[in-house]
Image (cartoon, coloured by chain):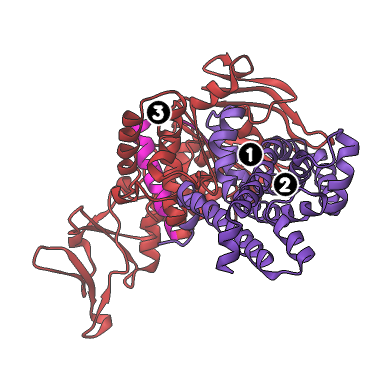
Chain colours: A purple, B red
């Protein structure tokens, strides 16, 4: 095992690096797209249902199918990493839009009305009151999306771009367990680290969310 | 002064919340909007800071139509307190209170100093400053709500059932402190409540709303109790309004008899400092009876009458500020005094002074 890692260190490292990029770039894109969409779904009551339904349907498309079909739709090369990035960004948006909308909707109306009544203008209220209060629920959604992306990247190996997934296909082809084990361990490790980072960020940015009990 | 001129509000869907409202809220006074749910009292309040826009008519503050003013600027000049306080859960108490100073660009240091000062003013211990709202009791949160509304020293305060979500004991306490605060500050206050007792206790003026957004009566609490405009108001102010209206008659004019007039065999036991302790009566045998209650010159006829009725010797005992006996009066004598005062009033003798404090 150790010998396998030693002999293939550069290959594993490259796969790991690609895995991180393929998983996390879509998270960033997803957040940027989901925030305004989620906000829109809350501000325009009639848009909530259609937006949540459409993104829900998007999430139900099998990932492999999406990887294969995307080049035909957006005109990329079949082996381009862009296919994976776009596909995973779509999944992230699908997961996060609902989180963002529900998080914003969960902000106590008494609080938002009080903010307006005290003289907050709409934009300042959004960034000063609504979003900060919605943050814990949104970060919970972000954790799910991030971990889900990290696991989905591997599927891309079947179409040739899959980060650590490449180790799985290689192990299967060679009937060789070591690359598969290394791939699983690194993938789980990455998911655990990213998840913990988000939890830490949550603790740092929302200290108030943990003081629910009255003294 | 806040003026409603023929203000109506019809919501989409056709519900008339407020119908042709004409009303003047005097400067520096508390005006209570009271009525059953759905009577338009909250809608009326929320039109004052343009949270709701009237369908017709206009509202003026000190003669200026509010529709011409920037809504956010207008709101910063009006303190706003609501039922569940509506505090920002993600901000500390001191930053919650400093909300409006922050909004208008007051420096952080100065805004926080002002907030700390207000915490003291509304009776919040200093050590709560860095806590979050979820760590406070309901009563404390409501105090923060009041402090937050006062932070920018607005001339106008809008209060929407601010004390109705706390328990009765805390509520009574908050009401007393609110009145004391207002006697210092003299804000122009619109105060919505569904509780007629609260309206009568707090209001300088009371507007009784009825379903459909009409005003059934607008007057002083005393006028409401003594001269309700119609059956709706009579019903709304409740059955014991006669007794409650005694709260507006001061006890200081009562013809109290000196202690020397006590009948033979009845006396008041006092301690070393001369403070009244208990009733002695030959009828009680060797035991004394508790005083049950006393009244002072600053109390009202309601208090004096209550003491007289519940006294074991049929006499209400007046004491001075130190608790020493001053004199006694019977229930019958109070009733005679009341009859004389009322007939003089209805003969057009002018208004009687209203005591500040209803301590029953």
Would residue B182 be counted in the magenta stretch?
Answer: yes
Let me know if residue B78 is in the magenta part. no
Q: Which residue is mark 2?
A: A92
Q: CA distance from mark 2 to mark 3?
A: 47 Å
- Mark 2 or mark 3, whichever is nearer to me: 2
Residue B139's disc is: none
Evaluate whether residue B249 shows in this view. Answer: no
For residue A47, what is the image quadrant? top right
Whether residue A98 can be seen here? yes
Q: Chain of mark 1?
A: B
**Residue nearest the observer in this picture, A146 or A176:** A176
Which residue corresponds to the image point at 54% horizontal and 49% vertical from the top-left?
A: B84
Which residue matches tag 1? B42
Give residue B289's position: percent from left, percent from top. Answer: 27, 76
Tag 2 and tag 1 share a subunit: no
Q: Position of residue B58 (x, y in %)?
A: 66, 19
Upstream in the sequence, badge 1 or badge 3?
Answer: 1
| Left or right of residue B230, residue B131 in this image | left
In what element is the residue under mark 1?
A: helix
Q: Chain of mark 2?
A: A
Chain letter of the residue carrying label 3: B
Q: Quadrant of the C terminus of chain B?
A: bottom left
- Residue marked by disc 3: B153
Residue found at x 36% / y 31%: B185
Disc 1 to disc 3, C-alpha distance: 23 Å
Percent coordinates x, y for residue B157 in the rendering: 49, 32
Indicate the secondary structure of the residue bearing disc 2: helix
Q: Residues within 10 Å of mark 1 (few under 14, many from 20)?
A: many
């Amino acid at each position: 095992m150790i010998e396998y890692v030693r002999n293939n260190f550069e290959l594993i490292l490259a796969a790991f690096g690609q895995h991180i990029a393929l998983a996390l770039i879509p998270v960033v894109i997803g957040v940027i797209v989901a925030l305004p969409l989620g906000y829109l779904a809350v501000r325009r009551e009639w848009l909530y249902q259609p937006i949540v339904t459409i993104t829900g349907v998007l999430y139900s498309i099998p990932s492999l199918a999406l990887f294969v079909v995307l080049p035909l739709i957006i005109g990329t090369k079949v082996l381009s990493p862009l296919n994976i990035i776009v596909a995973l960004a779509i999944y992230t948006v699908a997961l996060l839009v609902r989180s963002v909308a529900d998080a914003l909707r969960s902000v106590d109306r008494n609080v938002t009305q009080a903010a307006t009544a005290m003289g907050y203008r709409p934009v300042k209220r959004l960034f000063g009151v609504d979003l900060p209060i919605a943050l814990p629920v949104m970060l919970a959604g972000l954790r799910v999306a991030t971990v889900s992306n990290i696991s989905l990247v591997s599927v891309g190996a079947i179409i040739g771009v899959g980060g650590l997934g490449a180790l799985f296909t290689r192990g299967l082809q060679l009937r060789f367990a070591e690359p598969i084990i290394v791939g699983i361990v690194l993938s789980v490790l990455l998911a655990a680290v990213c998840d913990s980072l988000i939890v830490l960020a949550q603790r740092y940015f929302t200290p108030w969310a943990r003081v629910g009990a009255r003294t | 002064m806040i003026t409603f001129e023929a203000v109506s509000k019809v919501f989409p869907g056709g519900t008339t919340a407020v119908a042709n409202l004409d009303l003047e809220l005097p400067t520096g006074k508390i005006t209570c909007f009271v009525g059953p749910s759905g009577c338009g009292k909250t809608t009326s309040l929320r039109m004052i800071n343009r949270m709701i826009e009237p369908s017709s008519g206009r509202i003026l503050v000190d003669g200026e139509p509010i529709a011409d003013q920037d809504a956010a600027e207008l709101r910063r000049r009006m303190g706003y307190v609501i039922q569940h306080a509506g505090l920002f859960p993600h901000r500390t108490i001191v930053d919650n209170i400093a909300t409006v100073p922050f909004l208008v660009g007051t420096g952080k240091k100065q805004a926080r100093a002002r907030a700390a000062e207000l915490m003291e003013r509304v009776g919040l211990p200093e050590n709560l400053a860095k806590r979050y709202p979820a760590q406070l009791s309901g009563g404390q949160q409501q105090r923060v709500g009041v402090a937050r509304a006062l932070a920018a020293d607005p001339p106008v305060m809008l209060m929407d059932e601010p004390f109705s979500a706390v328990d009765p004991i805390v509520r009574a306490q908050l009401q007393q402190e609110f009145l004391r605060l207002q006697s210092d500050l003299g804000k122009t206050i619109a105060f919505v409540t569904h509780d007629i007792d609260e309206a009568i206790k707090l209001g300088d003026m009371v507007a009784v709303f009825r379903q459909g957004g009409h005003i059934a009566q607008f007057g002083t609490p005393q006028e409401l109790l003594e001269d309700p405009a119609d059956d709706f108001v009579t019903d709304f102010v409740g059955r014991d309004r006669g007794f409650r209206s005694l709260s507006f008659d001061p006890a200081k004019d009562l013809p109290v008899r000196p202690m020397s007039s006590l009948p033979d065999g009845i006396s008041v036991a006092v301690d070393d400092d001369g403070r009244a302790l208990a009733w002695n009566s030959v009828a009680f045998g060797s035991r004394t009876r508790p005083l049950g209650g006393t009244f002072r010159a600053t109390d009202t006829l309601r208090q004096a009458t209550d003491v007289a009725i519940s006294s074991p010797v049929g006499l209400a005992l007046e004491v001075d500020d130190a608790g020493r006996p001053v004199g006694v009066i019977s229930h019958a004598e109070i009733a005679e005094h009341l009859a004389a005062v009322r007939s003089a009033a209805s003969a057009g003798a002018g208004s009687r002074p209203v005591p500040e404090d209803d301590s029953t």
